[in-house]
Amino acid sequence: MIRGGGDMIPVLDTQAWLDRLLEAERPGADAILAFYDHRIGAICRDARLMSAPLDDHLVHRGDGVFETIRFTERKVIHLDAHLKRLAASAAGLELTLPCPSDEIRRIILEVARAGDAPEGNLRVLAGRGPGGFGISPSECPQSTLYVAAYKVALRSDAWYERGLTAFRSEIPVKPAMLARLKTTNYLSGVLMTLEARQKGMDVALSFDAEDCLTEAAIANVAVVDADGTFVLPEFRNALVGTTAMKAAELARAFMPVEIRRVPAAEIATVREMLILGTAHECVGVTHFEGRPIGEGRPGPVAARLRGVLRQALLAAGDPF
């Protein structure tokens, strides 16, 4: 209940606060399967109790890192690659994780198991920790770790067959130092997503100061160039995606692969453009800035890579 006007705001004791918390509306609660809070050292399934301290620098400074991990057919996908990147991102912030990667791995699998669903996502967040509302990490004696399992809508075959539309974003590219770390500061991605909604298109793509392609808001981008080579843009101002790197590894079995600069002018000649990521897996872009890519529909490389990606990642997945 929201109290307004001239009503006095009540000051509650602990039990009254908990009662009010449990009564409060909780948007998205039906999507939460289970969550873990390292401060408590336990898993819970009641989304009304999922919270982070306001003075955790993760919350009010964006001083933290995260990973989004898919699980399907009761297998956690590409777990070790995500853990490796989580550790690298934390090191880039000089953030000491609250426990070793092997322990985080065990926690993730147990949260997935507690969620008891065959399909969904896991969000892993590590923050500087609570301790104050300043900016200095010295305020925070202990870093925090949160893991949540939640439901996601599954993409249909028709969605992949339809493909996506893309455009050039007006949002400035992320600085190279920050682009290579998966931090909780995702404001540029939020603005690019809003931009796409306003333009009535699916995906905003960013370009660097030299007018070269970098990445999408929450995914990597690749092209099949005029010579039939699978090309990932250099990761100067883009995150090294776990799905993108796996796609490049698998593509080498049936076509040339390069990681190089992709000038904006080259997009007019590419055969295909692909969006690669945990959420998208591999989906083709049909139009860029209103002009068709290739034949204006998802191409054969997008379809083939999507199939081999899913097969390879599922075969190597960690069951729970």
Image: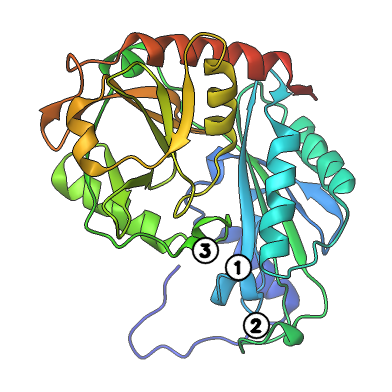
Mark 1–mark 2 Cα distance, whole angstroms, equals 9 Å
Which residue is disc 1 drawn over? 20
Mark 3–mark 2 Cα distance, whole angstroms, equals 41 Å
Q: Residue at x 35, y 16 (%)?
A: 228
| Amino acid at the residue labelled 3 | Leu
Asked if residue 14 is positioned above or below residue 259 in the image, the reply reads below
Q: Position of residue 210 (x, y in %)?
A: 29, 56
Q: Split into 4 quadrants, where in the image is the N terminus? A: bottom left
- Disc 3 is placed on an element classified as helix
Q: Is residue 68 left or right of residue 185?
A: right
Q: Split into 4 quadrants, where in the image is the C terminus? A: top right
Q: Is residue 28 left or right of residue 293?
A: right
Q: Is residue 82 left or right of residue 247?
A: right
Q: Which mark is residue 12?
A: 2
How many marks are shown on the rendered structure? Answer: 3
- Disc 1 is placed on an element classified as helix
Mark 1–mark 3 Cα distance, whole angstroms, equals 39 Å
